[in-house]
Structure formats: C-alpha cells, structure tokens
Image (cartoon, grey):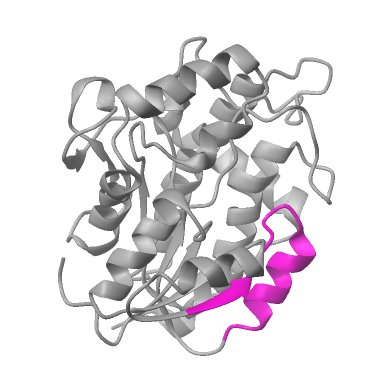
Amino acid sequence: MPDQTGRTAVVTGANSGVGLATVEALAGAGAHVVLAVRDVRRGEAAAATVRGSVEVRRLDLADLSCVHAFAAGWQGDLDLLVNSAGVMNLPEATTKDGFEMQLGTNHLGHFALTNLLLPRITDRVVTVSSAAHKAPGSPRIHFDNLNLTGEYDPMKAYSQSKLANLLFTLELQRRLTAAGSPVRAMAAHPGWAATNLQSNDANPLRRLFLRLGNKFVAQDSHAGALNSLYAAVQDLPGGSFVGPDGRAEMRGTPSLVGRSAAGSDPATARRLWTVSEELTGVTFPELAATVQS
C-alpha cells in the first residue's frame, strides 16, 4: 500500500469485520482514520486494538438526524470516505425514518452521508457493494415499493440494497465528472468474507449454511478488506468496481470485476438518485470549492 501519512479517512461500520480490517490497514500505512460506528463503546474497544492514529465518532446510518450531526461536526478536509457498514438478510424492520432497514442502512444512510461530506472530500469515495447485486432472481430496484411492504423477503431486500450501492456509485461518478471534480467514486465487494454480517440472517437454516460457509469457504476479513483498500489507494478510473478474482468472486486477489446489466444502467441510476434525494432530503452539493484547475 502507498504511504498514507498526512491523509484522513472515515470508515463506516468500523468496529468489526471488513470495516475494522480496512481501518487497520489505512492506519498502519500512516493515515488518521475515524471509526464511524453506531455503538461508540464497541468502537472504542476496536480502536484500542489498532496501531496508528485513530478516533471514534458516533454514526447511526439508520437515523438521518445522526447522519446530519456527524457531517455537521466534521471540520477540515477528508481524503477518503469508505462506506463499509452494512446489514444483511434481516427480519423485516424499518429505520428511524421509516425506510426498510437494509435499504435505509446500506444505501440511503450512505447516500446522505456522502453528499453531506462531499464538499470536504478531496480524493475518493469507496462504497462496499456485494456480488448479491446479481443474485438469482434478477435483483432490481422496486421503485413502486422500495420498502417491499407486503412482499418482504430478506434476501430480496439485501440484493436491492447492494444493487443500489452500485447504482449510487455510477451516478455519483457521473455527477462528479460533470462538476469537474477530481474526486472519484469507487465500488468494491469483499467476496465471501467471514464476518459477523451473516449472523443475523432471518432464516435459521440459512444462518447454519452461512456459518459453515464462513468456516470452510470464506476468506478472512483482512482478505475481504483488500478489495476496498485496492479501490481506495490504487490509481483506477472513477466508477471502477473491485472484487476478488477467484471462482464466483468469492475469494482471491483484488481485480476489476463486472456488474450485472441492472447495476450498469445509467437511467436507473439517475432515477434512484432522484428518489434518494426525495426520501432523505439531501441533494448533490455545490462543489466549486473542491474543483482543481
């Protein structure tokens, strides 16, 4: 990894798993890293295990008032934002603002956070998606029923949220380019990484399957984090999507990987952006102050 001395990064979902591994690598390379976490006590316990310059700040992506407070408290430049937090295959639930929990946490919370911080960001935004964006069943954005009310399925909701992450990155890069901004929007996925993410699956049989997969198939969280780190520090084109190069992209060396057709559709990306602005009340900011001549 290139030397990160003098750089500042924010990593969401940083108290365990891929998020914590990302923090460890960035701080180990010299960056000052802010662990943006819902549970500050757990975040401080995680930070105590990291060598390097770190701090903990509270961020609950399922509460837009908390997202606004986090962004309002930020001072100075921010080189790197890594949108790593996520929930997976949960029982049906809603965020404080009434959004389906997986879409609200994985996409809408990060959408609001990114746009609120964007005037401060100088280098890039990395958003963690998943190979689940192209899971069986042709995942799509259910614009007619984003909360999946009356048709909720945990995996359908998760796949929709991860597809939203990719479409968000696609449209964010388009807007950054149009604004003349040097900031790059990247996406990454960790493959199958053994973390706590799978432990809350709503289906007990699937929980058992995932537990066995974590033991016998998955790579560890540090290997999973390599994909986010590759997107964060390598000189890649804006809009790149990084994932493992192994079979079914479950494990392997970071490389550029493909999206589904649904994850590559600029019209759907623009529509999702408009809907996300309406739902969160957060819009793409004025970036004149960040444009470099």
Q: Is residue 211 left or right of residue 111?
A: left
Total label count?
Answer: 0
- Quadrant that contains the C terminus: bottom left
As for residue 137 lying within the magenta part, the answer is: no
Q: Nearer the viewer, residue 96 or 77?
A: 96
Q: Is residue 180 left or right of residue 268?
A: left
From the top left corner, tell me how far across and down residue 273 is, in percent: 60, 46
Q: Nearer the viewer, residue 162 or 220?
A: 220
Residue 17 visible? The answer is yes
Residue 177 visible? The answer is no
Q: Residue at x 23, y 74 (%)?
A: 29
User: Is 170 placed above or below 32 here?
Assistant: above
Q: Is residue 229 left or right of residue 157?
A: left
Q: Residue at x 31, y 79 (%)?
A: 31
Q: Residue at x 74, y 27 (%)?
A: 91
Q: Quadrant of residue 100?
A: top right
Q: Nearer the viewer, residue 251 or 147?
A: 251
In the image, the segment drawn in magenta is 55-74
Q: Quadrant of residue 237?
A: bottom left
From the top left corner, tell me how far across and down residue 249 is, in percent: 26, 27
From the top left corner, tell me how far across and down residue 149 is, in percent: 82, 23
Q: Quadrant of residue 155?
A: top right
User: Is 54 placed above or below 127 here?
Assistant: below
Q: Nearer the viewer, residue 186 or 28?
A: 28
From the top left corner, tell me how far across and down residue 178 is, in percent: 41, 61
- Quadrant that contains the N terminus: bottom left
As for residue 60 lying within the magenta part, the answer is: yes
Q: Residue at x 49, y 89 (%)?
A: 76
